[in-house]
Amino acid sequence: MNTIVIDNLEFSWSIGASNLLTIPELKVAKGEHLFVHGSSGTGKSTLLNLISGVILPDSGTIELMGAQTSSINQRRRDKIRANHIGYIFQQFNLLPYLSVLQNVLMPLKFSKSRKLNAEKNHNSSEQAAIHWLNELNIPSKLHTAPIAKLSVGQQQRVAAARALIGSPDIIIADEPTSSLDQDNVENFMHTLIEESAIIDASIVFVSHDKTLKKYFDKDFELRVAK
Amino acid sequence: MNWFHIASQSLLNRKTTALLTLFMLAISISLILTVDRIRVDTKENFSNTLSGTDLILGARTGSLNLLLYSVFRIGNASNNIGWASYLELTENEAVAWAVPISLGDSHKGYKVVGTTTDYFKYYQFSRGQSLEIYQGKAFENVFDVVLGYQVAKKLGYQLGEQLVLSHGIGNTSFKEHDDKPFSVVGILKPTGTPVDQSLHISLEGMSAIHINWRNGFEIPGMNITAEQALQMDLTPKTITAALIGMKSRIQTFQFQRMVNDYRNEPLMAIIPGATLAELWQMMSIAEQSLLAISAMVIVTGLLGMMTVILAGLNERRREMAILRALGCPASNIVLLLVLEAGFYGLSGLLLGYGLHLFWVAIASNLMMSLYGIELSMNLPNLTMLWVMTGFLVSSFLIGIVPGIKAYRQSLTDGLTLRT
């Protein structure tokens, strides 16, 4: 089963401009780990926005968990994103006014199915959050701390815990390691790959750093369309 | 953790701006409530001060002036009425009762009213209520004084105590009538009118303390003791004004014309209700403009709140993008901002009401001592309840504007975080 299917996708930010992004075909199987690379300006972030259903393609289709997101309304796309996607940004992932634990619990607020998953696997939402924080090596004394108390590496790991909670089908990561030092990058990548494997989630990982390719089953290069 | 929690935590994260905005709204709402409270209470107080009196007789002056000094103890009489004229006029068949009033002296800032015991019988306030004695009795002797409730309370006077009246009005009087002290024989029940702020003595007492005075000056070397004064003729020569009740209302106008045409002395008679209406008419422009200004302040407050929220949106793009990435529907972004605006509105309203009570508490002392007007802590009237409801509803509605902007912003930004 494929979690993501892209077919004949075309997208440009402004009408009349040459197509910024064209993807004839891209499939991500359940549990498959995909590395998307490309230099700046090739539309890496745009692709993630398209997969997440925040923006729509000009032509072609995107299927997410068997649903064609390009032909349903925005509210339903938001719902699909909440239920099936765990998202990790480049940096500053966390809401500064919530505690670490509250940040990790946020996805369960928007998705009933992820909340049910979390409760089924860990008895309660809080225990699920604590489980993932422990898996990602966040010391328990930091669980109730404000975000400002965390190092950048810790913040990215909390973001990973937030993406993993409630076992979504897809983890999308937008250059999550670019703000980390080398030791932290390895640590982060290993944990992310391992933990995603445990919940059998597909990963779409975007980076311009080709050295990260080694962690992935499959890679895909974005190029500026001529 | 619900939407309200997220909205409030997000606000708390920006607490300096949030608090300032809150105060801006609270001050604007407290202003209109307080202005209206003063307006309503002043009116009610004035309307309640005099009841049952058909005409006020006085020396010819402005009708408002006569009303203000004779009843409200505001301002001073420019001239007096001759006692003979008073007697002649009030002998008229149509007159049911007449109470003479003689003003001009004071005691520690409180005004002294020279009158007859008829004052306690005929003076009515607040729709026909008569004065009642709280302690002691009405004055009988020349040097007896009956205190208004507030005078006794504020100055701590008991029955039987001796006090000295001052010549003229004001806290720092030039001359004391210290040769002829008065003793407190009675204290009146509170009325909420200027009566509470007055000391009442007999007309004879008034004559007695001025027996060695001419034209407002003490005659040098002329010392007359209290005992000697009692032996002299204490019939008053002049009075300041008189309250008059007619046998029938119909005769009021006739008698009024007669007074106004009186040949021996320039006098006038006014109908208190009509003069009060004149006063309201005069005040209404000031009243309306004060209310209009207060309303503008509220509008300014609400606009200010909108500006604050709108200005903050740019810094909150990251927050919105994170929420969107988590699957928060764009419509909930609007809700978040409407909640925030509504939260400002509601807490601004509550804080503003509290602030209003605080202003009233501060102002009531001042209003009481300056004008004898008591401010109440009553619930706001219907108009103000509408203003408050309108304020609350508009605060929520105003949240839609930044809500829509954030919505559009979140659509164009997508999940791309901007620093």
Image: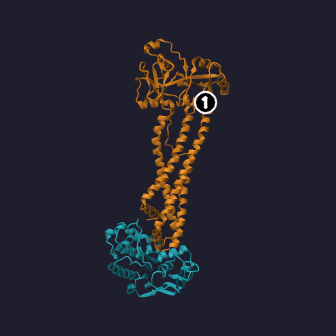
Chain colours: A cyan, B orange
Chain letter behind tag 1: B
Q: Where is A217 relative to B223, above or below?
A: below
The answer to whether A142 appears left or right of B326 in the picture is: left
The local crowd at label 1, few if under 14, some if 14 to 19, many if 20 or more residues have their Cα within 10 Å, is many
Name the spot of residue B32 as percent of width and height, x first.
53, 47
Name the spot of residue A153 as percent of width and height, x first.
35, 74
The answer to whether A182 appears left or right of B259 in the picture is: left
Amino acid marked by disc 1 = Ser
Question: Outermost residue toward the front?
Answer: B220
Can you identify the residue that label 1 sits on? B63
Describe the element under mark 1 as helix, strand or loop.
helix
Total marks drawn? 1
Q: A110 or B311, which is in the foreground?
A: B311
Q: Where is B348 relative to A159, above or below?
A: above
Name the spot of residue A32 as percent of width and height, x first.
43, 85
Q: B131 or A203, which is in the foreground?
A: A203
Quick check: can you spot residue A69? yes
Q: B324 or B174, which is in the foreground?
A: B174
Q: Where is A158 relative to B218, above or below?
A: below
The answer to which image quadrant residue B119 occupies is top right
Quick check: can you spot residue B141? no
Q: B296 or B48, which is in the foreground?
A: B296
Name the spot of residue B294 as percent of width and height, x first.
54, 48
Q: Where is B38 relative to B161, above or below?
A: below
